[in-house]
Amino acid sequence: MIVVSDTSVIGNLLMVDKLHLLNALFEKVIIPDKVADELSALETFGYNVDNIFQAEIISVRSVKNREKVESLLEELDPGESEAIVLALELDIPLLLIDEKTGRAKAEELGIEVTGLLGILLRAKAKGSIPALKPIVDSLISDAKFFINDKLYKSVLLKARED
């Protein structure tokens, strides 16, 4: 399956050294220019982003419909806006995105969404990771990934790690 991704999923996977899960789950991950820029900025925080841009699975594409991007910028950040427009332009049905407003806008436009926790659940179901909880705990402590208690418990229950 080919997907488009916003910054958060790739960036957080990089921060907890689980970027390889994208290879296990997807054929290709396409990111727009703004997402590439946002991921490159992680270098200023000491992360080696070479793994992202050298990965054969990840490719950068430019968005053509700048007018649509501009209209989305009223509600969303540049990476989210470009990711949604790119998914529409390429007719790719799945967008990797975590932010609530971006997810809602993508779904409103007919794009299926999943976030980082959905990726981890898929990886666990496929056998690509033995346990989800240590990764989620690492995301919370190391990457400062926010997850409320109710969602945390729900994800662990879905992963049969309650």
Image (spheres, rainbow, N blue to C red):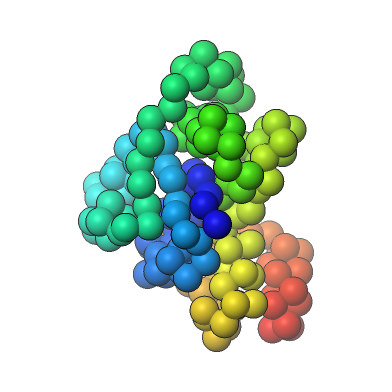
Give coordinates of residue 73: x percent, y percent: 54, 22
Image quadrant where residue 103 sits = top right
Q: Is residue 11 left or right of residue 52?
A: right
* Closer-to-camera residue (143/120): 120
Residue appearing at x 69%, y 83% in the figure: 161
Residue appearing at x 68%, y 60% in the figure: 148
* Closer-to-camera residue (65/108): 65
The quadrant in which the N terminus is found is bottom right
Can residue 46 be seen at all in this image of the molecule?
Answer: no
Please, is residue 142 above or below residue 1 in the view? below
Q: Is residue 12 left or right of residue 154?
A: left
* Closer-to-camera residue (135/83): 83
The quadrant in which the C terminus is found is bottom right
Image quadrant where residue 68 sits = top right
Residue appearing at x 52%, y 66% in the figure: 25
Residue appearing at x 62%, y 69% in the figure: 122
Give coordinates of residue 145: x percent, y percent: 52, 58
Please, is residue 93 above or below residue 74 in the view? below
